[in-house]
Image (cartoon, grey):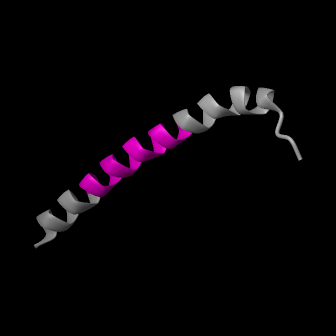
Amino acid sequence: MDIDLRIVIVFGPIVLALGWALFNIAGAAINQVQNFLNKET
């Protein structure tokens, strides 16, 4: 069961970009939720 290197070359950067975007969005979302909760109290 040999993986085709072309699949890794094509999908590797896409997966990396999606992971980076989700990391940044999650960080912003957590900050927004924390700010919202701090304003409530």
Tell me the quarter of the picture where residue 16 sits.
top right
Magenta residues (range): 18-32
Residue 2 image point, x, y percent: 86, 41
Residue at x-position 55% and y-position 39% = 18
Foreground pick, 11 / 29: 11
The tally of labels here is 0
Closest to the observer, 36 or 29: 29
**Rendering coords of residue 9 (x, y %):** 70, 26
Q: Is residue 26 above or below residue 34?
A: above
Where residue 25 sits in the image (x, y, percent)?
Answer: 40, 45
Q: Residue at x 78, y 32 (%)?
A: 7
Is 28 displayed left or right of 9 in the figure? left
Picture residue at 61% right of the left edge, 38% below the top: 15
Given the current orientation, which residue lies at the most extreme bottom position?
Answer: 41
Magenta-span inclusion, residue 28: yes
Locate residue 5 relative to residue 14 in the image: left or right: right
Q: Quadrant of residue 5?
A: top right
- The residue depicted at 42 percent of the width and 46 percent of the height is 23
**Which residue ends up furthest to the front in the rendered image?**
2
Q: Quadrant of the C terminus?
A: bottom left
